[in-house]
Image (tube, rainbow, N blue to C red):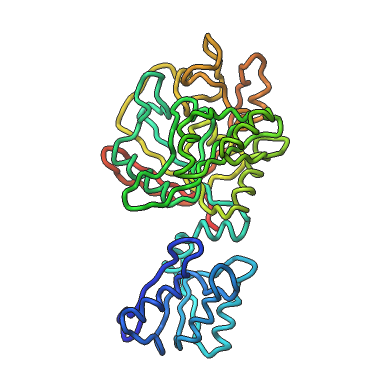
Protein backbone atom coordinates (compact mmCIF):
# COMPACT_ATOMS: atom_id res chain seq x y z
CA UNK A 1 0.00 0.00 0.00
CA UNK A 2 1.04 3.59 -0.57
CA UNK A 3 -0.77 6.71 0.67
CA UNK A 4 -3.71 4.58 1.83
CA UNK A 5 -4.24 2.97 -1.56
CA UNK A 6 -3.67 -0.60 -2.73
CA UNK A 7 -1.09 -0.82 -5.54
CA UNK A 8 -0.86 -4.61 -5.72
CA UNK A 9 -2.44 -7.77 -4.31
CA UNK A 10 -1.57 -11.45 -4.37
CA UNK A 11 -2.15 -14.81 -2.73
CA UNK A 12 -0.66 -18.30 -2.93
CA UNK A 13 -3.02 -20.12 -5.29
CA UNK A 14 -1.59 -23.64 -5.07
CA UNK A 15 1.48 -25.68 -4.18
CA UNK A 16 4.35 -24.74 -6.49
CA UNK A 17 2.92 -21.41 -7.62
CA UNK A 18 4.15 -17.94 -6.67
CA UNK A 19 3.95 -17.15 -2.97
CA UNK A 20 1.68 -14.28 -1.97
CA UNK A 21 4.49 -11.72 -1.71
CA UNK A 22 5.87 -12.40 -5.18
CA UNK A 23 2.34 -12.53 -6.61
CA UNK A 24 1.57 -9.11 -5.10
CA UNK A 25 4.79 -7.63 -6.50
CA UNK A 26 3.94 -9.08 -9.92
CA UNK A 27 0.50 -7.47 -9.68
CA UNK A 28 2.20 -4.12 -8.98
CA UNK A 29 4.16 -4.42 -12.21
CA UNK A 30 1.04 -5.36 -14.16
CA UNK A 31 -0.67 -2.23 -12.82
CA UNK A 32 2.31 -0.09 -13.74
CA UNK A 33 3.06 0.68 -10.09
CA UNK A 34 6.49 0.90 -8.47
CA UNK A 35 6.44 -0.79 -5.02
CA UNK A 36 9.59 0.99 -3.80
CA UNK A 37 8.90 2.72 -0.49
CA UNK A 38 5.49 1.04 -0.05
CA UNK A 39 4.15 -0.98 2.88
CA UNK A 40 3.45 -4.68 2.39
CA UNK A 41 0.84 -6.46 4.54
CA UNK A 42 1.15 -10.26 4.79
CA UNK A 43 -0.83 -12.90 6.68
CA UNK A 44 2.28 -15.04 7.28
CA UNK A 45 5.90 -14.04 7.79
CA UNK A 46 7.81 -14.01 4.47
CA UNK A 47 9.88 -17.12 3.82
CA UNK A 48 13.68 -16.99 3.81
CA UNK A 49 14.42 -20.51 2.50
CA UNK A 50 14.64 -22.06 -0.94
CA UNK A 51 11.73 -24.39 -1.75
CA UNK A 52 9.52 -24.74 -4.81
CA UNK A 53 9.85 -20.95 -5.00
CA UNK A 54 12.85 -18.74 -4.15
CA UNK A 55 12.84 -16.86 -0.81
CA UNK A 56 10.26 -14.08 -0.65
CA UNK A 57 12.53 -11.89 1.48
CA UNK A 58 14.85 -11.54 -1.53
CA UNK A 59 11.99 -10.26 -3.70
CA UNK A 60 10.91 -7.80 -1.00
CA UNK A 61 14.41 -6.39 -0.60
CA UNK A 62 14.92 -6.15 -4.37
CA UNK A 63 11.62 -4.30 -4.75
CA UNK A 64 12.61 -1.69 -2.19
CA UNK A 65 9.65 -2.23 0.14
CA UNK A 66 10.04 0.12 3.11
CA UNK A 67 7.78 -1.55 5.69
CA UNK A 68 6.30 -5.04 6.17
CA UNK A 69 3.39 -5.72 8.52
CA UNK A 70 3.12 -9.41 9.43
CA UNK A 71 -0.13 -10.83 10.80
CA UNK A 72 1.26 -14.17 12.09
CA UNK A 73 4.56 -15.95 12.55
CA UNK A 74 5.62 -19.03 10.59
CA UNK A 75 5.87 -21.95 13.08
CA UNK A 76 7.86 -24.22 10.76
CA UNK A 77 11.40 -25.06 11.86
CA UNK A 78 13.00 -23.89 8.61
CA UNK A 79 11.39 -20.44 8.90
CA UNK A 80 10.41 -19.29 12.40
CA UNK A 81 11.70 -15.73 12.54
CA UNK A 82 14.41 -15.90 9.89
CA UNK A 83 12.50 -13.83 7.34
CA UNK A 84 11.78 -10.86 9.62
CA UNK A 85 15.39 -10.87 10.81
CA UNK A 86 16.75 -10.73 7.25
CA UNK A 87 14.34 -7.92 6.37
CA UNK A 88 15.41 -5.86 9.39
CA UNK A 89 19.07 -6.43 8.50
CA UNK A 90 18.25 -5.13 5.04
CA UNK A 91 16.79 -1.90 6.39
CA UNK A 92 13.10 -2.81 6.17
CA UNK A 93 10.82 -1.80 9.04
CA UNK A 94 9.07 -4.92 10.35
CA UNK A 95 5.94 -4.87 12.49
CA UNK A 96 3.86 -7.78 13.82
CA UNK A 97 0.11 -7.22 13.97
CA UNK A 98 -1.88 -7.96 17.13
CA UNK A 99 -5.49 -8.36 18.19
CA UNK A 100 -8.22 -9.35 15.76
CA UNK A 101 -5.96 -9.16 12.70
CA UNK A 102 -3.45 -11.59 14.19
CA UNK A 103 -6.20 -13.99 15.30
CA UNK A 104 -7.84 -13.93 11.89
CA UNK A 105 -4.53 -14.67 10.19
CA UNK A 106 -3.81 -17.62 12.48
CA UNK A 107 -7.24 -19.10 11.82
CA UNK A 108 -6.87 -18.58 8.09
CA UNK A 109 -3.63 -20.57 8.10
CA UNK A 110 -4.68 -23.45 10.37
CA UNK A 111 -3.91 -26.27 7.88
CA UNK A 112 -0.42 -24.87 7.23
CA UNK A 113 0.24 -24.25 10.91
CA UNK A 114 -0.78 -27.73 12.06
CA UNK A 115 1.24 -29.40 9.32
CA UNK A 116 4.25 -27.22 10.12
CA UNK A 117 4.09 -28.07 13.83
CA UNK A 118 3.08 -31.73 13.74
CA UNK A 119 3.55 -33.05 10.20
CA UNK A 120 -0.16 -33.99 10.20
CA UNK A 121 -3.08 -32.59 8.17
CA UNK A 122 -5.83 -30.52 9.74
CA UNK A 123 -8.91 -32.76 10.09
CA UNK A 124 -12.32 -31.22 9.41
CA UNK A 125 -15.28 -33.49 10.17
CA UNK A 126 -18.52 -33.09 8.23
CA UNK A 127 -21.76 -34.53 9.58
CA UNK A 128 -25.43 -34.25 8.69
CA UNK A 129 -28.24 -35.23 11.01
CA UNK A 130 -32.00 -35.16 11.28
CA UNK A 131 -34.01 -33.52 14.05
CA UNK A 132 -34.35 -36.92 15.75
CA UNK A 133 -30.58 -37.35 15.79
CA UNK A 134 -30.17 -39.74 12.86
CA UNK A 135 -26.91 -39.42 10.92
CA UNK A 136 -27.85 -41.80 8.12
CA UNK A 137 -30.91 -43.02 6.27
CA UNK A 138 -32.37 -46.50 6.05
CA UNK A 139 -31.79 -48.81 3.06
CA UNK A 140 -34.14 -47.93 0.25
CA UNK A 141 -34.44 -44.30 1.33
CA UNK A 142 -32.59 -41.39 -0.27
CA UNK A 143 -29.02 -41.19 1.07
CA UNK A 144 -29.35 -37.43 1.53
CA UNK A 145 -30.26 -35.86 4.85
CA UNK A 146 -29.21 -32.26 4.17
CA UNK A 147 -30.64 -30.11 1.40
CA UNK A 148 -29.30 -29.16 -2.01
CA UNK A 149 -27.72 -25.89 -0.85
CA UNK A 150 -25.80 -27.75 1.85
CA UNK A 151 -24.62 -30.39 -0.62
CA UNK A 152 -23.37 -27.65 -2.96
CA UNK A 153 -21.39 -26.19 -0.06
CA UNK A 154 -19.86 -29.61 0.69
CA UNK A 155 -18.57 -29.79 -2.89
CA UNK A 156 -16.90 -26.42 -2.42
CA UNK A 157 -15.31 -27.67 0.81
CA UNK A 158 -14.01 -30.74 -1.02
CA UNK A 159 -12.39 -28.49 -3.62
CA UNK A 160 -10.71 -26.52 -0.83
CA UNK A 161 -9.31 -29.71 0.76
CA UNK A 162 -6.25 -31.73 -0.18
CA UNK A 163 -7.99 -35.02 0.58
CA UNK A 164 -11.46 -36.41 1.38
CA UNK A 165 -11.83 -39.51 3.57
CA UNK A 166 -14.57 -42.08 4.20
CA UNK A 167 -14.78 -45.55 5.72
CA UNK A 168 -15.34 -48.69 3.69
CA UNK A 169 -18.93 -48.99 4.93
CA UNK A 170 -19.79 -45.69 3.25
CA UNK A 171 -18.43 -47.08 0.00
CA UNK A 172 -20.44 -50.29 0.36
CA UNK A 173 -23.63 -48.41 1.15
CA UNK A 174 -23.44 -45.43 -1.21
CA UNK A 175 -20.73 -46.11 -3.83
CA UNK A 176 -19.70 -42.42 -3.70
CA UNK A 177 -17.51 -40.49 -6.13
CA UNK A 178 -16.12 -38.06 -3.52
CA UNK A 179 -15.13 -35.60 -6.25
CA UNK A 180 -15.67 -31.85 -6.01
CA UNK A 181 -18.44 -31.06 -8.45
CA UNK A 182 -17.90 -27.32 -8.19
CA UNK A 183 -18.07 -25.44 -11.52
CA UNK A 184 -15.70 -22.76 -10.22
CA UNK A 185 -12.75 -25.11 -9.66
CA UNK A 186 -10.87 -27.80 -11.51
CA UNK A 187 -9.05 -28.92 -8.38
CA UNK A 188 -9.89 -32.38 -7.10
CA UNK A 189 -8.94 -33.82 -3.69
CA UNK A 190 -7.20 -37.13 -3.15
CA UNK A 191 -9.88 -39.67 -2.19
CA UNK A 192 -8.99 -41.73 0.90
CA UNK A 193 -10.79 -44.89 2.03
CA UNK A 194 -10.16 -46.38 5.48
CA UNK A 195 -10.53 -50.06 4.65
CA UNK A 196 -8.68 -52.31 7.10
CA UNK A 197 -9.28 -55.51 5.11
CA UNK A 198 -8.70 -54.00 1.63
CA UNK A 199 -12.22 -54.84 0.49
CA UNK A 200 -12.74 -51.79 -1.75
CA UNK A 201 -14.59 -53.13 -4.83
CA UNK A 202 -12.61 -52.81 -8.03
CA UNK A 203 -15.81 -51.88 -9.88
CA UNK A 204 -16.71 -49.06 -7.45
CA UNK A 205 -17.11 -45.54 -8.76
CA UNK A 206 -13.92 -44.58 -6.94
CA UNK A 207 -11.86 -47.14 -8.83
CA UNK A 208 -13.58 -46.41 -12.15
CA UNK A 209 -12.70 -42.71 -11.94
CA UNK A 210 -8.98 -42.81 -11.14
CA UNK A 211 -8.45 -40.50 -14.13
CA UNK A 212 -10.30 -37.78 -12.21
CA UNK A 213 -8.47 -38.06 -8.87
CA UNK A 214 -6.19 -40.56 -7.09
CA UNK A 215 -7.60 -43.09 -4.62
CA UNK A 216 -5.59 -43.97 -1.52
CA UNK A 217 -6.69 -47.01 0.50
CA UNK A 218 -5.60 -47.27 4.14
CA UNK A 219 -5.36 -50.91 5.21
CA UNK A 220 -4.16 -52.77 8.29
CA UNK A 221 -1.15 -55.13 8.30
CA UNK A 222 -3.63 -58.04 8.53
CA UNK A 223 -5.29 -57.21 5.20
CA UNK A 224 -5.38 -60.02 2.63
CA UNK A 225 -2.26 -59.57 0.44
CA UNK A 226 -4.24 -60.67 -2.61
CA UNK A 227 -6.67 -57.80 -2.05
CA UNK A 228 -3.93 -55.20 -1.65
CA UNK A 229 -2.13 -56.46 -4.77
CA UNK A 230 -5.37 -56.27 -6.76
CA UNK A 231 -5.99 -52.70 -5.62
CA UNK A 232 -2.45 -51.62 -6.53
CA UNK A 233 -2.63 -53.31 -9.92
CA UNK A 234 -5.94 -51.53 -10.57
CA UNK A 235 -4.26 -48.16 -9.92
CA UNK A 236 -5.04 -47.35 -6.29
CA UNK A 237 -2.37 -46.38 -3.79
CA UNK A 238 -2.32 -48.60 -0.71
CA UNK A 239 -1.04 -47.42 2.69
CA UNK A 240 -0.45 -50.04 5.37
CA UNK A 241 -1.16 -48.33 8.69
CA UNK A 242 0.39 -50.26 11.56
CA UNK A 243 -0.27 -49.99 15.27
CA UNK A 244 -1.76 -51.99 18.10
CA UNK A 245 -4.95 -49.91 18.38
CA UNK A 246 -7.30 -48.14 15.96
CA UNK A 247 -6.01 -44.82 17.30
CA UNK A 248 -2.44 -45.84 16.50
CA UNK A 249 -3.48 -46.74 12.97
CA UNK A 250 -5.29 -43.43 12.50
CA UNK A 251 -2.13 -41.65 13.65
CA UNK A 252 0.02 -43.70 11.25
CA UNK A 253 -2.33 -42.96 8.35
CA UNK A 254 -2.32 -39.22 9.08
CA UNK A 255 1.48 -39.22 9.28
CA UNK A 256 1.62 -40.80 5.82
CA UNK A 257 -0.81 -38.22 4.44
CA UNK A 258 1.28 -35.45 5.96
CA UNK A 259 4.40 -36.76 4.25
CA UNK A 260 2.47 -36.46 1.00
CA UNK A 261 2.00 -32.73 1.72
CA UNK A 262 -1.69 -33.18 2.46
CA UNK A 263 -2.42 -30.37 4.90
CA UNK A 264 -6.25 -30.45 5.03
CA UNK A 265 -8.28 -33.66 5.35
CA UNK A 266 -12.06 -33.45 4.94
CA UNK A 267 -13.63 -36.32 6.85
CA UNK A 268 -16.95 -37.62 5.49
CA UNK A 269 -17.49 -41.02 6.99
CA UNK A 270 -20.39 -41.21 9.44
CA UNK A 271 -20.30 -42.00 13.14
CA UNK A 272 -17.96 -45.00 13.08
CA UNK A 273 -15.04 -43.32 11.37
CA UNK A 274 -15.71 -40.07 13.25
CA UNK A 275 -15.55 -41.98 16.56
CA UNK A 276 -12.20 -43.50 15.57
CA UNK A 277 -10.75 -40.07 14.81
CA UNK A 278 -12.19 -38.69 18.04
CA UNK A 279 -10.61 -41.52 20.03
CA UNK A 280 -7.31 -40.68 18.34
CA UNK A 281 -7.77 -36.99 19.31
CA UNK A 282 -7.50 -36.00 15.67
CA UNK A 283 -10.55 -33.84 15.03
CA UNK A 284 -9.68 -30.16 14.74
CA UNK A 285 -12.98 -28.77 13.45
CA UNK A 286 -16.49 -30.03 12.78
CA UNK A 287 -19.18 -28.81 10.41
CA UNK A 288 -22.59 -30.27 11.18
CA UNK A 289 -25.78 -29.78 9.16
CA UNK A 290 -29.06 -30.21 11.04
CA UNK A 291 -31.88 -30.77 8.58
CA UNK A 292 -35.56 -30.08 9.36
CA UNK A 293 -36.59 -33.70 8.85
CA UNK A 294 -37.55 -36.66 11.04
CA UNK A 295 -36.25 -40.02 9.83
CA UNK A 296 -37.54 -42.38 12.52
CA UNK A 297 -37.13 -46.09 11.92
CA UNK A 298 -34.74 -48.55 13.50
CA UNK A 299 -31.35 -46.91 14.20
CA UNK A 300 -29.63 -50.28 13.71
CA UNK A 301 -30.87 -50.45 10.11
CA UNK A 302 -29.31 -47.22 8.91
CA UNK A 303 -26.94 -46.73 6.03
CA UNK A 304 -23.23 -45.93 6.18
CA UNK A 305 -23.17 -43.53 9.09
CA UNK A 306 -25.59 -45.29 11.38
CA UNK A 307 -23.54 -48.17 12.72
CA UNK A 308 -22.52 -47.80 16.32
CA UNK A 309 -22.28 -49.75 19.52
CA UNK A 310 -24.72 -52.66 19.56
CA UNK A 311 -24.55 -53.41 15.82
CA UNK A 312 -25.65 -56.94 14.88
CA UNK A 313 -25.32 -58.45 11.37
CA UNK A 314 -28.75 -58.82 9.75
CA UNK A 315 -29.86 -62.17 8.31
CA UNK A 316 -28.11 -63.05 5.10
CA UNK A 317 -24.60 -61.98 6.13
CA UNK A 318 -22.69 -58.88 5.10
CA UNK A 319 -23.23 -58.62 1.38
CA UNK A 320 -26.14 -56.21 1.06
CA UNK A 321 -26.39 -52.42 1.16
CA UNK A 322 -26.01 -51.08 4.68
CA UNK A 323 -25.25 -54.52 6.08
CA UNK A 324 -21.46 -54.55 6.17
CA UNK A 325 -19.79 -54.83 9.58
CA UNK A 326 -17.94 -51.93 11.13
CA UNK A 327 -14.42 -51.61 9.83
CA UNK A 328 -11.91 -53.07 12.29
CA UNK A 329 -9.70 -50.00 11.97
CA UNK A 330 -12.56 -47.90 13.27
CA UNK A 331 -13.56 -49.88 16.37
CA UNK A 332 -12.13 -49.32 19.84
CA UNK A 333 -10.62 -52.43 21.50
CA UNK A 334 -13.44 -52.62 24.06
CA UNK A 335 -16.00 -52.57 21.22
CA UNK A 336 -14.29 -55.52 19.52
CA UNK A 337 -14.37 -57.51 22.77
CA UNK A 338 -17.90 -58.81 22.22
CA UNK A 339 -18.46 -62.24 20.75
CA UNK A 340 -20.23 -63.23 17.52
CA UNK A 341 -20.18 -59.80 15.95
CA UNK A 342 -21.84 -58.10 18.93
CA UNK A 343 -19.63 -55.17 20.12
CA UNK A 344 -19.61 -54.65 23.85
CA UNK A 345 -21.41 -51.45 24.96
CA UNK A 346 -19.12 -48.69 26.16
CA UNK A 347 -19.47 -45.27 27.66
CA UNK A 348 -17.80 -43.74 24.61
CA UNK A 349 -14.95 -41.23 24.38
CA UNK A 350 -14.52 -38.32 26.73
CA UNK A 351 -16.47 -35.19 25.87
CA UNK A 352 -14.60 -32.76 23.61
CA UNK A 353 -15.74 -29.18 24.04
CA UNK A 354 -15.30 -26.58 21.32
CA UNK A 355 -13.04 -23.58 21.72
CA UNK A 356 -15.49 -21.61 19.61
CA UNK A 357 -18.58 -22.22 17.51
CA UNK A 358 -20.99 -20.43 15.24
CA UNK A 359 -24.25 -21.25 13.49
CA UNK A 360 -25.83 -20.14 10.23
CA UNK A 361 -28.61 -21.20 7.90
CA UNK A 362 -27.81 -22.89 4.58
CA UNK A 363 -30.99 -23.28 2.59
CA UNK A 364 -33.41 -25.02 4.95
CA UNK A 365 -30.62 -26.49 7.09
CA UNK A 366 -28.79 -25.20 10.15
CA UNK A 367 -24.99 -25.39 9.92
CA UNK A 368 -23.01 -25.48 13.17
CA UNK A 369 -19.25 -24.99 12.84
CA UNK A 370 -17.14 -25.83 15.89
CA UNK A 371 -13.38 -25.40 16.34
CA UNK A 372 -11.74 -27.75 18.84
CA UNK A 373 -8.06 -26.87 18.43
CA UNK A 374 -6.01 -23.91 17.33
CA UNK A 375 -2.51 -24.24 15.92
Tell me if 22 is positioned left or right of 7 in this view. right
Residue 19 percent coordinates (x, y): 47, 70
Name, please, the residue furthest toward the top.
315
Query: Quadrant location of residue 133?
Result: top left
Identify the residue at horizontal 45%, vertical 29% (top origin). Answer: 175
In the image: residue 29, left or right of residue 59: left
Determine which quarter of the picture holds residue 101: bottom left
Return the residue nearer the eye: 18 or 7. Answer: 18
In this view, 91 is above or below 47: below
Above or below: residue 66 compared with residue 121? below
- From the top left corner, tell me how far across and down residue 195 is, in percent: 59, 32
Residue found farthest to the right: 244
Where residue 102 appears, x then y in whole percent?
A: 46, 68
Residue farthest left in this picture: 363
Q: Residue at x 51, y 18 (%)?
A: 323
Q: Quadrant of the N terminus?
A: bottom left
Which one is in front, 129 or 319? Answer: 319
Q: Residue at x 67, y 30 (%)?
A: 223
Kindly indicate the quadrant of the structure image that contains residue 351: top right
Amino acid sequence: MRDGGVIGEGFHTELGDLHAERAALADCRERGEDPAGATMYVTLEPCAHEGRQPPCVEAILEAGIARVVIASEDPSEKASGRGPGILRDGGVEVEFAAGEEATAARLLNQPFRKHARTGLPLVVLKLAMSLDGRTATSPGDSPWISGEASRDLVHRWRAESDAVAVGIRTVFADDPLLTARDPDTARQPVRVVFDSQARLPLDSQLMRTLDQSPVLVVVSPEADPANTIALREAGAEVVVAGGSTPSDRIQAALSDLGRRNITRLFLEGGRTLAAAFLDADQIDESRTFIAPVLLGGDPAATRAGGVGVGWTPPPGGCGGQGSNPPDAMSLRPEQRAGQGGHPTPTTGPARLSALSSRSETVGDDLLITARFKEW
